[in-house]
Image (spheres, rainbow, N blue to C red):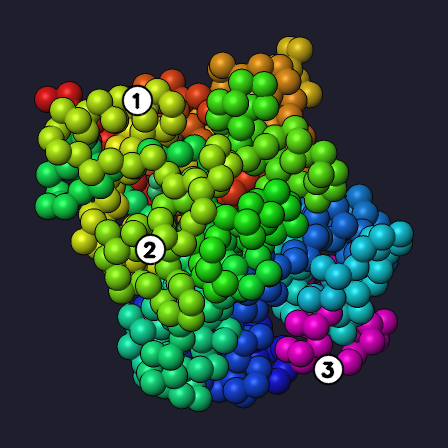
Amino acid sequence: MKYSALVETYEKLEKESGKLKKTEILSNLLKKTPTNLLPKVVLLASGKIFPTKSEEKTGIANKMMIKTLSKTTGLSESEITGKFRDLGDLGSVAEECIKSKTQSSLAQKKLTVELVFNNLQKLSKIEGEGSQDRKVNLISELLSSSKPKEAKYIVRTSVETLRIGVAEGITRDAISKAFKVDKKMVERAWFLNPNYGKIAKIAKEEGENGLKKVSLTIGNPYIVMLGESAGNLEQAMGKYEDVIIEYKYDGVRIEIHKNKDKVLLFTRRLEDVTDQFPDLVKLAKKGIKSNKCIVEGELIGIDPKTNGSIPFQQLSRRVQRKYDIEKMTKEIPICMQLFDIVYLEGKSLLNKDYETRRKKLKETIKIIKGKFQLSQSLIPKNIKEAREFYQKASMEQEGIMVKNLKAKYQPGRRVGQWLKVKPILEPLDLAIISAEWGTGKRSSWFGSFTLGCLKNEVSDKYLACGKLGTGLSDEQFENLTKKLKDLVLEEKGREVKLKPEVVIEVGYEEIQESPKYESGYALRFPRLIRFRPDREKPNELKKIKNLFKQQFSSKK
Ligand code: AMP
């Protein structure tokens, strides 16, 4: 299949902003894609080269791309950087540069989807000495055979910013439309086996019957069940007849997949973190009695001196770590707080209620105190008991989860069967979307940061909702500047527009309605709580709206 066919679709998708139209465009592409290429085309169409975060990344930063463009076109790196500053997108820079090259000087090999996909996948495998040059060569090989528009999208895919607004929901709907299968079935398959490439192929070849067969499998991460925010304890407790309350731990959600002596660990973002936590692997081998099962819980970090738990921010250092792992296991020991079991001895437990699953979990686990145990929980007899538990949980951890004992496990997103209750207004996870250079002694750092939420689930539009500028230490200003410098999209005077890739957890005193920001809301006194490297996207506007309303009702 010619890469140009995909490029035509990209162009249409970029121009169209309506969700329905986008779905139709993508669905038309899927219909004409040969079956064996569907997995690749589905990934490329959403700007990806790997199905989930658990796999590798291309590792191409803007700087390396500028070098590549210079090598391919003969233009100097500073000329290309200048164009980048003007256009704000390296894809458009590539398009312009290739356009201005005389065609004869560029080799004209026909670009196929396979060639582009394979070269881009190879990028992540290149490591060690000379890896930069080899990466540059691989992309340059593609760009030398590209027409201007093709170059635009190869570059955007390489730096992992496609900007055509194909979110998960659109891919789901397009598969449903192209192969005439129920949307809900596609979504269900995605939650259980999050790989739209594979799902599209199944939908085309086997239809709904095939999708029905998609199930939990040991070794493949699934999308976990989450809780919704609830106003206060009384409101949350009033939602269900049979309630269990549990500590809400400030850690990392982990799926433990055990198959005989093989244990795999996945985060909620589907990252494989088995290598990062050999201590947990050992505990799981010892503490899980069953040969084949998947259990879930929250992994928390422990302070070796006090034996108390440490904030998530500190534990997250271990999630990213690729070296000195043994040393880290001593510096930051862990404790697994288990709360669910979804698969046991070859059978899915998704359709069992929580009461039954907790019972099975208890039977399956050999508790290793302080290291591998069941989450603290209580089936409260009355609200007084619940309140006492809640107060203790809020002092020791983040608050509690109120769960419906009669609820099945529903993979994917927030489903209203688990409720989070926290003592303070919940912090927001927001992206840093722009920054402003500081003044005086801070003139070489960014001095204030505009925070943004996502417009909605399907959009990749970010809406400003506040500015973070005070309350940071010099070190934090410097660190943030370092983190953000690679993400600059456009610089206008002292304002710098950024790729919205850094997500931070923000606390605040109040949410106010405000015409000043695009979102219509402003956070009063926002403050940085921690970085959220585990979050790819910030919260949506809907969440700010809900919190705004909640705060209003609790004041009344
Ligand atoms: P949030 O990220 O605020 O939406 O909270 C959801 C997260 O709370 C989940 O992904 C879990 O990692 C975490 N969590 C902590 N303790 C529990 C618990 N007892 N039950 C369920 N989730 C929990």
At x 40% / y 75%, what residue is drawn? 214
SS for callout 2: helix
Say if 349 sits above or below 485 in the image. Answer: below
Seen as rendered, the residue at the extreme right is: 129
Direction from residue 305 to residue 520 in the image, left or right: left
Q: Nearer the viewer, residue 10 or 292?
A: 292
Tags 3 and 2 in contact by the CB under 8 Å rule? Answer: no
- Label 2 sits on residue: 360
Q: Amino acid at mark 2?
A: Lys
Q: Which numbered disc covers residue 392?
A: 1
Question: Gap between marks 3 and 2, in whole Å?
Answer: 57 Å
In magenta, the rendered stretch is 92-119
Question: Gap between marks 2 and 1, in whole Å?
Answer: 27 Å
Q: Quadrant of the C terminus?
A: top left
Please say whether residue 106 is one of the residues in the magenta stretch: yes
Residue 369, given in percent of the width and then of the height, sits at 47, 35
- Disc 3 under 8 Å from ligand 1? The reply is no
Seen as rendered, the residue at the extreme top is: 440
Q: Nearer the viewer, residue 491 or 355?
A: 355
- Label 3 sits on residue: 110
Other-residue count near label 3 (Cα within 10 Å), few / some / many at <14 / 14–19 / ≥20? few
Q: Which of label 3 and label 2 is nearer to you? A: 2
